Amino acid sequence: MSLKFFLTVYARLAGVTALVILLCVLLFNGINSVRHQFWHERFADPLMRWLAATPAPTRQYHWMPSLFDLRSGPPEQFDLDKVAIERLGYGQVVAQRTDVGFRYLVRSFEGGLVSLRLEQPYREMAQAVALVVRWHLETVNPEQRADVAVQLAEALGVRVEPVQDLQALPNQDVIEDIANTGLVVFNEQGTRNTQVLLRLEEGDLVVVRMPSPFNPWAWPMIVLLGIVVGSVLAAALFLAMRFVDGHLRKVESVAVRIGRGEMGARVESEDGTLVSRLACSFNSMAEHIQRLVQVQREMIHAVSHELRTPVARIRFGVQMIESGSSPEVLEKQLDGIDGDIQELDELIDEILTYARLEQGGPVFSLREDSVTDLVRQVVSEQQMIRPEIRIECRIDEESERWALSDVEPRYIHRAIQNLVGNAGRYAAGRVLVNCHLDEDNCRVDVEDDGPGIPEQDWEKVFTAFARLDDSRTRTSGGYGLGLSIVRRILYWHGGQAFVGRSDDLGGARFSLVWPRRKPDDAIL
């Protein structure tokens, strides 16, 4: 995996994560601000409507103005906007945020407004409700308290229950506080719900249980956030899969085109994408297939042409044998047929070697061997075959020091042999083989004093079945496969074969260069 691709995916995932977090925060804060406002108005609704229905609430509940800033009067006394006035006209309870808590307003039955300000809305609302409950319970006979408690609980939206067992109280501190103050606010065990314990004048204890406080993590909110997160992730996954599918469709389209015979079709893909490596490998495969198809066509065409000449000579020789009368004529024709058969055998060997190298290469088993010994062996063998040509070998002492190299000896021998044999075929009288090795590379130069090769044909000589002259004879033309085999052998060794002009002898100079040691991760 490339670093660019990793960073791209990481950046996109980070972007999606940031988007999800941002959307969740915005939705959470936005929706909860509306929910919180609605909860305040719904929570205060029972008490505010009770006060609105009470004539002169500031006089009847005389302690509330000092404790909770209870006020009543015409609307002009209150600083209200048009929306609040309109809502109050509809009979709704309005909650307004102030610098110190909330102010609750409602229209009274007399046409004025009743206002209540709480710094800690939930706790102080519980105190206000509890004080109202205590005032009403203390103003009635003990026999009527049960019925009045039920009426108050229904009107104020709370639960009013007498305390029958002190063991039901949460701890001893509550009992001590109720004895001192007569009113204690505490939380119900295991919940956030607030309860108020009241002590009446006769000593009876009453508990007022308030509704649940505002919960920003209510299950509808969690479900909504889950839907948002799932939707964003689904959209991101859809876009990612669409992006990948688009690139895979490009590869599929090119594969279909190649299957129809468009061998030049290639996949276009930007670097750093998920399928860039797939596209690169696919294009490499397509190029290899295209080259194999081209080589196959060239071989079929060239082989049919190359085989025609020796087969025609063999047929002619057989006809001469049938009509020959003297033993000398028969022997001459048999020698010619034997030579033609040997030529066919050599041609078939060249074709098989070239096909094996072109179609993926042989199974190379590189091992350490002496390159200088291989060069000397080839020079010795070629000198015996061509005694009329002087073949020289030059190897300096420094090269002897680095003679051992990772090679496939049989194929390197074949490559050097093809070059020396080719040089001997065209040389006027001298062939020079230079071997230079160092710590990193191996280089073998084969030069001759022949006519040389024009510069415009330097690449052409390595093409299969290509010969710069039109000769088809065994003595000069060859088969046009030797140099192609040389280049493929060097390719599978990780090197190159190229041609130039000899400065010393004036003819052609063929050079082989390959790494002295194979890389640790090389797979051949």
Image (cartoon, rainbow, N blue to C red):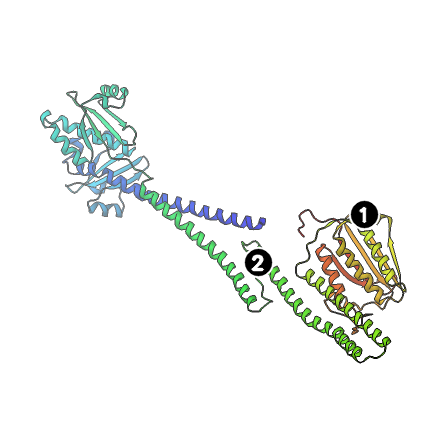
In the image, what residue occupies the spot 79% across and 54% down?
443
Q: Name the one closer to the observer, 261 or 108.
A: 261
Whether residue 503 appears in this view of the structure is: no
Front disc: 2 or 1: 1
The image quadrant that residue 497 belongs to is bottom right
Q: Which residue is mark 2?
A: 279
**Percent position of residue 45, x then y:** 21, 39
**Is residue 2 shown to the viewer in this render?**
yes
> Could you tell me the amino acid type at mark 1?
Trp
Left or right: 174, with 479 as reference point: left
Query: With respect to residue 2, does 498 lie above or below?
Result: below
Residue 79 to residue 375: above or below: above
Who is closer to the viewer here, 96 or 393? 393
Q: Residues within 10 Å of mark 1 (few under 14, many from 20)?
A: some
- Secondary-structure class at tag 2: helix
Q: Quadrant of residue 164?
A: top left
Residue 214 drawn at (x, y percent):
30, 37
Which is more N-terminal, label 1 or label 2?
2
Secondary structure of residue under mark 1: loop
